[in-house]
Structure formats: C-alpha cells, structure tokens
Image (cartoon, helix red, strand yellow):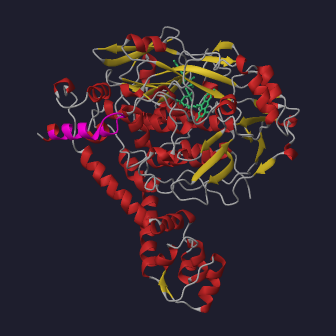
Amino acid sequence: MPQPSAAAFFMQKNKRFVNNSPLFMYNCLMTSPDYMNNKFDIIVVGAGHAGCEAALSAARLGCNVLLCTLNVDNIALQPCNPAIGGPAKSTLVREIDALGGVMGEVADATYIQMKTLNSSKGPAVRALRAQSDKKEYTQYMRNLLENTDNIWIKQACITEIKVKDGQITGAVDEYGIEYSCRAIILTTGTSLEGKMYIGLQAYSGGRLGERAAIGLSESLRKHGIITKKLKTGTPARVDKRTVDYSKMEIQPGDDKLSFYSFKPNRPIRPQFPCYLTRTNEETHSIIRANLDKSPMYQGLIQGVGPRYCPSIEDKIVRFASNPSHHIFIEPEGLNTYEVYIQGFSTSLPAYVQVEMLRSLPGLEKAHIIKPAYAVEYDYVPAVQTKHSLMSKDIEGLFFAGQINGTSGYEEAAAQGLIAGINSVKYLNNSEPLELSRASSYIGTLIDDLVTKDIQEPYRMLTSRSEYRLLLRQDNADARLTKIGHELGLIDDAQYKRFLNKQDNIKKEIERLRETKISASEEVNAALAETGEHIDRGIRLAELLKRPNINYEIFKKLDEKTRNLNLSDDITEEVEVLIKYDGYIKRQEQQVETSEKLEKYRIPSNIDYSKIKHISTETREKLEKIRPSNLAQASRIGGVKPADISVLMVMLGK
Ligand SMILES: Cc1cc2nc3c(=O)[nH]c(=O)nc-3n(C[C@H](O)[C@H](O)[C@H](O)COP(=O)(O)OP(=O)(O)OC[C@H]3O[C@@H](n4cnc5c(N)ncnc54)[C@H](O)[C@@H]3O)c2cc1C
C-alpha cells in the first residue's frame, strides 16, 4: 500500500487552506494591509503547542493574528518526549479535535507508531499514544500556520506588554518595534527567564539550543501580575547506531490502527518499534555517588518539578527499595539517528550521564548526541485568570500552556485553543466559552488551574476527573462537536458526518436491545471461545453486559450484525454505552447535583469581609480565587461544606 508522506497528506487534507499561486498571495496582502502598520487584532506570544492552537483558532474565526516566537524553526517543537497522548492526554487531544483544533490531525499525519494503552482495562482509562516524527510534526504545523489566512509569523522576542486603563493596547519586541492589538495570548512555555542546568553549571535558555525570553516577566510584574518558578527536565538523546537493541525488549505498535482525529482519511504510515531496558544496581550506585553534583540536591534549583515525571535521581532517592526502573528507547523520527531515553531525565553533569547510560543493558557503548538537562522558568499562577483564561486584572490579556503552571503538549494545546476562541469572543463582546468539568477534561483542567492554587507542574490524569467514565477518548466528539460547529471551527461536512455517526450508534443500541438470540447449539459453540454459555434466549444487549463478551463476537452469532458491518469507532461506542450503562447513569446524576450548585452565581464585586460565620481561611481563599459560582467555591482546597451552606443561604437571599 502506498504510504503518504506527511507533506502529501497535508496537501490532501488542507486543500482549502493551501493556495500558493502568486495571485492568491497578492490578494491576501491587499486584504490585510494592517500588518504594514504593525496593527493586529491579537498577538500570540510563542509558537509552541498552545500558541499554534491559539493562533489557528483565532485566525480561522476571522481575526488578524501576529504570532511571535523565539525561533520559527522550532514551531510546535516537542522538547521532551517525541509522543502525543497517553492516559487522559489522549482524551484531551480528541477533545481538541472535536472542538476544531489541530493537534489530532498533526499527530495522525506524522506518527511513526500508534499504540492503545490499557486496552484490556475499562474505557475510562484506555488511551491512544502516537510516537511522532518530531521534524515532520513541526513542519506540518508550520505548513498549517503559513497556509491559514490572517496569521503573520515573526521571529522576535516580545519583551513588554502595553496596558492602558486596565486594557491591553499592544506589545513591544526586543528590537523596540511596537505593535498595537486589543488582545495578547501569552504561551511562553519554559522560556520566561529560563535557566538550564547540566550538573552545577547553569546556562540562560528555555530549552537546549534556544535562548531564554528576558524582559517579559519583568513587564508582567510591573503590571501587578505575580510570577513564580517551576522546574522540569528531559533525558539525553543518543545515537541509535550505538544502541544494542538485541539486549532489549521490543515494544511494537498496534496492528489495528486507531487515530486521534474524528475527521476522515487518516494516513496509513510505516510503524517503528520502541525498546525497553531497565536500570540496575550499578546505575543506582553511580547516581547515589554523584548526588552532590545535582543542582536539585544542592539547592540551586528552587522551582518545584513535575511529580509525575520525576528525574531518575529523584526515583532512586524516593523509591530506594525499588531494584530497577523501566527505561524506554524511543525513535525521534524516520530520518534521524537520534533516540530518546524515556524515564532517564536528569540534571547530573554530562560526564556522569555517560557513565549512567552505559550501565544500562544495550547502552554500554552509547554515544550521547544531546545531554539531559533541567530547566527552571517563570510561570504565572493561574488563580490570577478567569475560566476564559483571561487575566482577572488586565482585560485582553490571556495565558495558555506551560505559563499557567501545566506540563505537557496536550495540556498546552487544549488551553491554547480555548484562549484563541475566547480572545475572539472578547473582541466581539460575546460570552466566553467556559467548558464545565462534566463536559470535558479541558473543562476540568482549566477549572483546576484557576480554582486550585497549583504549586507544582500540573499534568492531566484520569484521577483528576470525578466524571471520568463520562469523559472518555471515544466519546469526545459526542460531547464537543456541536460546540465546535456552533463556534465555526467544525465545518458542515464534518458536522454532518458526526450526526450520522451518532444516529448509527443510537440505532444500533436500540437494535441490540430488541434482538434476541436463542440458546441453540450453534450459538453456544460460537460463545465457547469466550467461556460464556446461555441456557435460554437472551437479548444481545443483555449478553453484551457480560464481562467476557464483546461486540466482535456478535458477528459470529448474528447475521444482521455481520451484514451491518459498522465501523470500529461506532461499535466501540455501542459496547461502552451498553456495558457501563449503570455506572454512566450514576455519574450523570452526580453531574445534575453539581449543576445545581453552579446555578448559584457569585457576583464579582462580592465583599467577603462582610460575610459572617465563615472561617478566616475560607475568606482568604475566596478573596484570592474569587470563584464565579458556588460549585467552583466548593472545589477550593480548605473551603468547608459549612461555609458553602452559609454562602448558599446568602446568595439565595
Ligand atoms: C526540558 C523540558 C522538559 C520537559 N519535560 C516534560 C515532561 O516531562 N512531561 C511533559 O509532559 N512535558 C514536558 N515538557 C514540557 C512540554 O514541552 C511543554 O509542556 C509544552 O511544550 C508546553 O507547551 P507551550 O505551548 O506552553 O510552550 P512551548 O511548547 O515551550 O512553546 C513556547 C514558545 O514560546 C516562545 N516564546 C517564549 N517566550 C517568548 C517571548 N517573550 N517572545 C516570543 N516568543 C516566546 C518559545 O520560542 C516557544 O516557541 C518539557 C519541556 C522542556 C523544555
């Protein structure tokens, strides 16, 4: 089968955006003269995962966007592992796709391995993971940006924001050029005042090979925005010619491919395996013997690191009784020898890294192309922003991605999309898009960020959602496509396909509820492979609720199922909705209860000091976070149910 390159796939998928004829270019310039006066509707600072989604959504919704970034060759770079998705994150990617964002399309177009994780577990934790060709990923995203009307890309460091009467009026770059705009979206990642550490040596920079963004943090602080420090780290990259894969376990991709995007025409590409090796006592002793050379352990880094992606030295110290840790060797792309050493993030000196790596089976002769390092950077605690991701204090100033204290490409892209949409809504004076916790992981993520005073890098986990059986990767389209279509980011053809799919799901569930099969010998013979048996006639929906039965077996039991030949995404959804019907209904009831609290809106000018009978701690928290409704107030850490009752009575009055 011919395997399309990512570039060919781009042309096929984005016909409506691609027009390189000189006539088109001229028309485009003629209709957008404002760029000549440095006048834009929106400035997006940073072309990482958040910035790209923000710029694309705002431009597709009709705004003139300046996209400034430190290095245009690093657009949508994956500075850590070359992979999109994994538990909870895959649901974010599908939600982005359903709303009209692009991360799913780019990951689908540039994968070198697709794998569904937790496939034998329940649907709430099943997760797709795409190993990406890193170079193709950035190129594909750049093509999307360059071929979207209204986006002007510029390599420049924004050093200052301009504010007048509490509203954004523009920005200034490092060359002193001033731009006017009505909204700014800051998506600066790990760059703000970034300092990288390799051993006890520190370098100014946001990520290896890219300078730090100096000036902007100071400008934010001058305007009253509080910044704090966080830290993250990444492992070394090694030359694959120096890896002995025969000493490792192969980790292949799936035979049956799944994709992120709900849109049709997904590309079939060659898949490449990852490999698994393990740390051993020798590795651990090298690390223990060199802890005095770690910037973390010597107190040079103050910022808190990601709890769920600890460095290898952290793992050895915190889980001292663990004799071994998994290390995955992941290719960075088709046309490079660089491989990523997953699970081996460290900030120890480069010469120690060589020793540590060479203690791993299969890496005895490893040659390091890029060393591991840690980076400390400024972020803006998101309790200073509203659910729309706009600052509570400066109108028109939006924040998205790592600058809000998150970690991860998917978390960043999700926020970028929402900030892009809401910046346009702000300019149009319309109500912002605020997704509820019950609607999506995106809603949960943003609610957690703005409600809880996050003190460490925030990563999306399934356990962060109280409704995780409702928020699955398989039904992201059912939850959000209608919103994407109403916004104008999902076109009519895609919306029609979506409605058709939902109709087919509904009809199939009804059919399975009505269709009865008899307890014949043939039926029980077909059921034998599942270990199930029926003594009397049973409806297919009832049979599907048994743990060992899946939809696939119906193709052997029932001719109609065979002839219908429904697509996998439809049958997967049908199976989940029938099997977990009881649990799903219970979570829907929880949503109803929470929605009652959401109806109690809290006025933004409320004076908490005048409310008696609430504790001082609660009063301080409410004053700091200023929740917009009672449900949000109830989720603030330290706010007690008794305080919520007092507020409820007061708001009721
Ligand atoms: C060393 C390292 C380790 C990481 N480890 C992990 C991990 O373990 N797990 C995980 O999930 N994620 C990790 N990440 C984080 C992941 O890369 C980010 O979460 C994700 O890329 C954030 O996306 P973003 O869009 O917010 O920012 P980024 O993708 O970082 O993009 C920021 C963009 O802003 C630009 N920029 C910044 N300031 C300015 C300015 N003033 N003017 C113009 N442009 C500017 C930069 O050039 C860059 O293009 C790591 C990142 C790094 C660098």
Q: Is residue 644 magenta?
A: yes
Q: Nearer the viewer, residue 195 or 182?
A: 195
Q: Which residues are magenta?
A: 634-649
Residue 172, how many percent across, how many down? 45, 12
Residue 641, how many percent across, how many down? 27, 41
Q: Measuring 63% from the left and 34% from the top, which residue is drawn there?
A: 138
Q: Is residue 161 magenta?
A: no
Ligand 1: give its quadrant: top right
Residue 143, how many percent across, how many down? 59, 36
In the picture provided, is 449 more to the left or to the right than 474?
left
Figure check: 555 above or below 648: below
Question: Where is residue 22, by image quadrant?
Answer: top right
In which quadrant will I find the C terminus? top left
Figure check: 557 above or below 65: below
In the picture provided, is 510 more to the left or to the right than 521?
left
* Main SS of residues in magenta: helix
Q: Can the viewer see residue 379?
A: yes
**The residue positioned farthest toward the bottom in the image shown:** 520
Q: Measuring 62% from the left and 89% from the top, which residue is drawn there?
A: 522
In the picture provided, is 158 more to the left or to the right than 255?
left
Residue 407, how many percent across, how many down? 54, 32
**The residue positioned farthest toward the left in the image shown:** 653
Figure check: 652 above or below 538: above
Figure check: 135 above or below 349: below
Q: Nearer the viewer, residue 445 or 334?
A: 445
Question: Where is residue 526, by image quadrant?
Answer: bottom right
Q: Measuring 38% from the left and 52% from the top, which residue is drawn there?
A: 482
**The residue positioned farthest toward the top in the image shown:** 176
Q: Can the viewer see residue 370?
A: no
